[in-house]
Amino acid sequence: MWSYLPAFLGACLLVAASPGPSTVLIIRNSLRGRRAGLLTVLGNESGVFLWGVFAALGLTALLEASEVAYDVMRVVGAVVLVAFGIQALRAARRADDASLADAAGPADPSAGGWREYRAGLLLNLANPKAGIFAMAFLPQFVPAGAPHLTTMLALAAVWAVFETGYYATYVWGVGRLRRVLSRPGVRRRLEQVSGGVLIALGVRLAIES
């Protein structure tokens, strides 16, 4: 397995660098603070690991084999994306005099960050493409003769940890620019762009075959 690791990490880098709804959500929540951004990353990567577990157990094959199951997940994922997009657009309307945390919706201290973690997890698990991709991606790096289940689980864990480190650099970068990005006009525009992107991705997911 160790001989496959450099190629696997290189592939993980290419996957992480491809922009998607999770990237948009991580950047948006990072504007509320590094803690919110990191918790969103952890939620997203928990979803990545769970898809890896499902792929190792053969459960994601159901999405590929059953058109009905895939369509249900696709519609649910589209609804989730559009809901996050609408939330961002509503935040943009409130971004004039409010702080960034207020604009995005004040976090409940008693929730212990559950809101951001849950958002990252939900957005990832609501995307059936992630499940199909995990099923196609991970087996390519299982060495011949290696135990399939344990190797797939190990690869899923490495994938999630690698992406956690990668997206943490996004959180750090947004934190460094937060003074500029927190200006009301800039903040409003970022919320509008992120909301529009999420809605567009949701609509595309809903109408594609």
Image: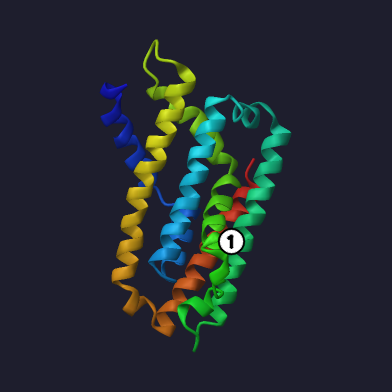
Question: What is the quadrant of the C terminus in the image?
Answer: top right
Q: Position of residue 8 (x, y in %)?
A: 33, 31
**Does residue 22 show up?**
yes
Question: What is the quadrant of the N terminus in the image?
Answer: top left
Q: Can you say whether 29 is above or below 159 in the image?
A: below
In the orientation shown, which residue stands out farthest toward the bottom? 97
Most foreground residue, 7 or 201: 7
Res. 5 image quadrant: top left
Q: Can you say whether 18 is above or below 83 in the image?
A: above
In the orientation shown, which residue stands out farthest toward the top? 145
Q: Can you say whether 1 is above or below 157 in the image?
A: above
Say which residue appears at 67% left-offset and 42% top-offset: 73
Most foreground residue, 103 or 83: 103
Q: Can you say whether 181 is above or below 204 in the image?
A: below
Q: Position of residue 33 (x, y in %)?
A: 41, 70
> What amino acid type should be assigned to the residue bearing mark 1?
Ile
Most foreground residue, 184 or 176: 176
**Does residue 27 show up?**
no
Q: Position of residue 24 (x, y in %)?
A: 46, 59
> Which residue has dot 1 on it?
199
Say which residue appears at 42% left-offset and 36% top-offset: 157
Side of 177 where 56 appears, left or right: right
Q: Position of residue 156 (x, y in %)?
A: 44, 34
Say which residue appears at 34% left-offset and 42% top-offset: 162
In the orientation shown, which residue stands out farthest toward the front? 110
Side of 181 where 203 appears, left or right: right
